[in-house]
Amino acid sequence: MKVRYILPLLFAATGAFAQYTPPKAGLIAAPYQELPLGAIRAKGWLQEMLIRQKNGATGNLDNLYPLMNQRNGWLGGDGDQWERGPYWIDGLLPLAYILNDKELIAKVKPWVEWSLKSQTADGYFGPSKDYPEEEGLQRDNSRDWWPKMVMLKVLKQYYSATGDKRVITLMTNYFKYQLKELPSKPLDNWTYWAKYRGGDNLMVVYWLYNITGDKFLLELGDLIHKQSFDFTNAFANTNMLQQMGSIHTVNLAEGMKEPLIYYQAHPEKRYLDAMKKGLNDIRTYDGFANGMYGGDEALHGNNPTQGSELCSAVEMMFTMESSVQVTGDVDYADQLERIAFNALPTQISDDFATHQYFQQANQVMLTRQMHNFGDNHGGTDICYGLLTGYPCCTSNMHQGWPKFTQNLWYLTPDKGIAALIYSPSEVTAKVGDVPVTITEETNYPFDESIRFTLSISKQLKFPLHLRIPNWCTKAIIKVNGQAFSEPAGNQVVQVERLWKSGDVVELVLPMHIAKSKWYENSMAIERGPITYALKIGEDSRKVENTKDAATYGTSYTEVLPATPWNYGLYDVSSEKLNEYFKVVNTGKKSLYPWNQENAPIMIKTKGKRIPSWKIYNDMAGPLPYSHIYGLESSQQEEDIMLVPYGCTTLRVTQFPLVGRK
């Protein structure tokens, strides 16, 4: 079949096509380099997610949430002066340029333009005036360092998409201002948030240094690191992650990448080791089977009825994306996919109009009720709504899928292209002097096979890097139908050859049923990057909020169980997993797979109800320990279905055990 060579829709900021750029002296050559915004296009179900964002809250938040109107301080108004405006644009801007959508780009531009024009002679930019208190708005601490960190990320992405040199001028002047002011007004001068989230500031400083080579930026980087919370020591030498309430969940998600960001200028192994230990300790002491951890809002252990904040999910994704680039470690890519394919889709409604502030791994009822969360917001925290819980997530949830798309592909120092995260997409980049387009066709993470087709103007030799996840025992790689290799998991392999247009690489990642143990020795069932949860009938009802609509929105959705939920599973030996857990291909081919109706894959198994496990405080009662001697369970086995976690609203994910097989 003859393949026609097609130019990309959007030219990258660094020239007509993206090309690997070596780092400046003083920073390491990271194994993977981000592509300019617009070089990667979503396809298939991932494109559908982005379109739903455009048609939902992401593309219309200025109409849905009055805080985003012309009064916003980041548009020069006297309204909200703090993080929520930049949070929204941090997701809207990459969505706009990935979709190459003129309407969304037009919404982004006023925020970018005002920010660029707000810079004063001393280098400061952004809102600068505090206003009297007004309900629902953050009108003080306008000069706080933290909101600027978010807008710096926005401007970095804007430059990546457009090449607008005004961004470089603004950042250079602002970072000179920071170098001058931080000694007397440190990161925690106004609020403590910036101290914990300094890694975002540091990331942009190093990014700018790789463009301009200004040496003062390395000095500023050292100062920001010194004033930031010491995650390296906290992870390596303290029991912080074993202590409930020890750190705010979003501070942890956003800030924990700081050791790896700093590592780029100070490549000491202790920074790598600290990050690995931190991630492993989160899994051990606070982790859930969905890839997230207990934090509602402070760190709150691993009981599966504790909440996990939506902001922490999208920020953990960005941290994993950043960690992959710096280290090339497969573990971070695996963790990114686990969050993206489990926790993220279920916490936002199908139309991307509403969300949950907290989600629960074992979530069997959603009502307006005060729960055992560290922070409660009128009992609305697990109900779906535009403003339920606290509105930071109303603004911040939008970055998840666009930045995920932006990190599917990378450039490499060996003049190759890397596919480290898998989803349907297309990338265009320059390898040597030759533009290359690679189309990725797949229904991953539900299917095992991924197909890459190359479009290239002339024959060219370069390496194609492919990640083999840790959960995959042995992958299969074919080139033009011929066997190439069968690599083991937990590595990145290189397929290097003389490529020509029309070449096809097939990657098969066989997915096996696996079990994992969690809180109270409960068990979760996994297959590939997806965790499976009990399919529960759902009775949804929209509630008009007549009590406190200004704070929590005019309405919210509650969901009650319509079928039994209190099942336990058998503790099946590894040898018998395929016998007791049968994979069922439903045949569903929807572009939107993330609900029960469209789930492409299910797992059929046997379970028994546990009569003593009942609703308590409008949620699943205390999880029975496995194995309790003489635990009461029903005499009769029942056929039950497990569905992908991301397709659920109600669910049991971490099951008590009713016997061994």
Image (spheres, rainbow, N blue to C red):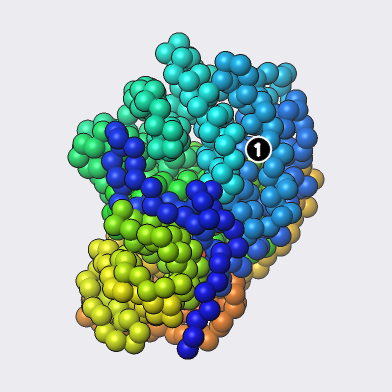
Above or below: residue 135 compared with residue 552: above
Name the residue beneath numbered marker 1.
112
Q: Residue furthest left?
A: 269
The image shows residue 482, relative to residue 352, as above or below, that is below
Disc 1 residue crowd, few under 14, some 14–19, many 20+, Cα 10 Å: many
User: Which quadrant holds the C terminus?
Assistant: bottom left
Q: Position of residue 129 (x, y in %)?
A: 68, 18
Name the image quarter holding residue 197: top left
Q: Is residue 144 above or below residue 534?
A: above
Residue 537 percent coordinates (x, y): 58, 73
Name the kind of residue labelled 1 in the image. Answer: Val
Name which quarter of the figure residue 574 lies in.
bottom left
Report the side of 634 relative to 555 (left or right). Answer: left
Residue 608 position in % (x across, y down): 40, 76
Element carrying mark 1: helix
Q: Nearer the viewer, residue 167 or 314?
A: 167
Q: Is residue 439 above or below residue 307?
A: below
Given residues 504 and 537, the one toward you in this image is 504
The picture places residue 130, in percent across and down from the top left corner, at 68, 18
* Residue displayed at 34% across by 45% down: 22
Lateral position of residue 63 relative to residue 557, left or right: right
Q: Is residue 568 visible?
A: yes
Q: Is residue 557 visible?
A: no
